[in-house]
């Protein structure tokens, strides 16, 4: 794949593309709460629709097919992330889910210390401590919640862990076409979730309805928009934005997603996050800003 030219865009254009992608991603809670489908049905068809759009664009662009054994780990991680994220939003508030998914950098830092034996600097340490404090506040606020709410919180943490695994996999596979990798992730997630449902149906633990596309035209339309506009298109915008701005700046701009997600969910479904979730989420996001805002040494 040809490397994009340096003058293919401007930093302002790149920032607008990243912000637009983050805003589109931030509507996930509004879609999940409005659709009111089972987590499997929502996650499965969102992945199928997003993957189909990305694959079509990949073919139109005449991208290069590739394979690496690490893609198996990547697709498995993405499948688990996709399901746990949707399921978490189904059982608990969108704010809980989106803030807890943004613990991915925490898992990556912990993994680098304990498994890769890497050292962390002072800024990374305080960012990690602040993130863990934010998570602790969210967990404390949900200590007396119902079993479903607690299960949703656990799944939210799991989505952050699997998100970190996806990020590490994508970095390892950075020599491959990112559009191809994203298409494979989504289509692989659909195939994996569908296969699991077939097994569960065969065992009598699930009904065939879990595999059915919703019959209601309104839900059909929302699910198509959810897969194509909320999931598929933002990846293309994000990739285009990274051509002109750094990953660090893109990461900061992407924090618009967890900030706006609870707002869209409140406006569409009337869901209000608890005070502890808001406080814990703000601590977590501030810690991520501390971690990723460049300092003077980064600019040298």
Image: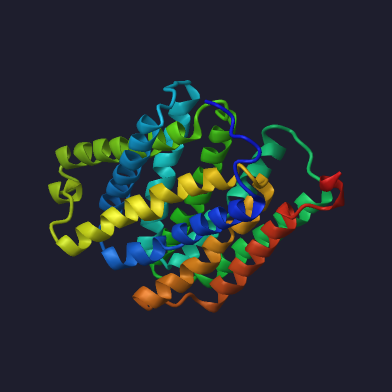
Residue 189 showing in the rendered view:
no
In which image quadrant can residue 139 be found?
A: bottom right
Which residue is drawn at the image coordinates 50% and 25% (left, top)? 70
Number of numbered discs on residues: 0
Which residue is drawn at the image coordinates 37% and 54% (left, top)? 229
Q: Is 15 in front, or is 197?
A: 15
Query: What is the x, y in percent for residue 134?
Result: 63, 64
Image height of 11 relative to 68, above or below? below
Query: What is the x, y in percent for residue 205?
Result: 19, 46
Image height of 209 relative to 276, above or below? above
Relative side of 239 to 151, left or right: right
In which image quadrant can residue 31 be found?
A: bottom left
Which residue is drawn at the image coordinates 34% and 40% (left, top)? 51
Q: Is 60 in front, or is 27?
A: 60
Quadrant of the image for the C terminus?
Answer: top right
Query: What is the x, y in percent for residue 8?
Result: 60, 41
Query: What is the x, y in percent for residue 267?
Result: 40, 77
Residue 75 showing in the rendered view:
yes
Relative side of 191 to 85, left or right: left
Q: Is 294 in front, or is 239?
A: 239
Which residue is drawn at the image coordinates 51% and 54% (left, top)? 157
């Amino acid at each position: 794949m040809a490397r994009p030219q340096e003058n293919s865009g401007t930093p302002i254009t790149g920032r607008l593309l990243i912000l637009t992608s983050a805003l589109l991603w931030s509507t996930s809670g509004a879609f999940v709460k409005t659709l009111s489908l089972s987590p499997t049905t929502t996650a499965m068809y969102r992945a199928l629709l997003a993957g189909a759009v990305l694959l079509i664009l990949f073919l139109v662009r005449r991208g290069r097919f590739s394979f690496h054994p690490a893609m198996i780990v990547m697709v498995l991680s993405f499948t688990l992330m996709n399901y746990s994220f949707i399921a978490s939003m189904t059982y608990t508030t969108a704010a809980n889910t989106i803030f807890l998914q943004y613990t991915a950098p925490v898992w990556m830092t912990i993994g680098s210390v304990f498994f890769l034996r890497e050292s962390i600097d002072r800024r990374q340490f305080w960012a990690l401590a602040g993130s863990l404090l934010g998570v602790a506040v969210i967990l404390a606020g949900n200590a007396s919640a119902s079993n479903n709410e607690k299960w949703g919180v656990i799944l939210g943490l799991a989505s952050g862990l699997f998100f970190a695994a996806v990020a590490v996999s994508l970095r390892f596979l950075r020599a491959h076409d990112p559009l191809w990798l994203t298409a494979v992730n989504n289509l692989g997630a659909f195939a994996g979730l569908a296969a699991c449902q077939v097994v569960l149906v065969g065992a009598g633990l699930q009904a065939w309805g879990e595999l059915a596309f919703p019959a209601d035209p309104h839900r059909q339309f929302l699910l198509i928009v959810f897969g194509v506009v909320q999931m598929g298109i933002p990846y293309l915008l994000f990739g285009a934005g990274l051509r002109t701005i750094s990953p660090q700046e893109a990461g900061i701009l992407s924090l618009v997603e967890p900030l706006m997600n609870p707002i869209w969910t409140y406006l569409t479904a009337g869901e209000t996050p608890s005070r502890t979730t808001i406080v814990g989420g703000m601590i977590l996001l501030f810690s991520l800003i501390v971690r990723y805002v460049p300092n003077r040494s980064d600019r040298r």
